[in-house]
Amino acid sequence: MEDKWSKVIIHASAFFAPVLVPILFFLISSDEAVKRLSIQALLFQGVMWVLVTISGILSWILIGLPFLLVFSIMLIVVPIIGIVKALNETEWDYPIVGNWV
């Protein structure tokens, strides 16, 4: 049960503390699944913010505009999917970075 709510908090932290909460859960948790998820969440946020920044820079020449829209939507939708999967106690990996960890 603790595992389930830890995962929900890690996913939900994308909306209020996308760096701090995953690092804290990585440091204080003894469960390997929670540690793996916290690293995935941290990597996902980092990669997505880099992609959003690059797309934002390229959007002034209209090339990055579609990418900026897609990546911005992903920053909102992917954590919500993760929250739902965690509440259903289903194993789920973040897209893009799930296989890196």
Image: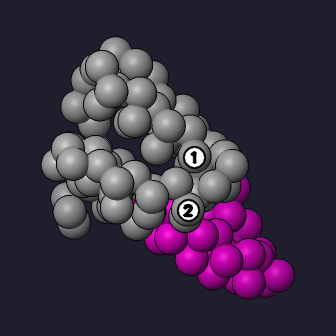
What secondary structure prevails in the magenta region?
Answer: helix
Kindly identify which residue carries mark 1. Answer: 13
Give the residue number, with chain letter if any, for mark 2. Answer: 20
**Residue 7 percent across, percent down from the top left:** 38, 36
Q: Separation of disc 1 and disc 2 at Cα?
A: 8 Å
User: Residue 28 in the image: x percent, y percent?
Assistant: 34, 54
Which one is nearer the viewer's eye here, 6 or 40? 6
The kind of residue on which mark 2 rests is: Leu
62 is within the stretch colored magenta: yes
Q: Residue at x 22, y 66 (%)?
A: 100
Q: Give the image location of residue 95, x and y in percent.
A: 35, 51
The quadrant of the picture occupied by the C terminus is bottom left
Residues drawn in magenta: 44-70
Picture residue at 26% right of the left edge, 23% below the top: 90
Q: Which mark is residue 43?
A: none
CB of mark 1 within 8 Å of CB of mark 2?
yes
Residue 89 seen? yes
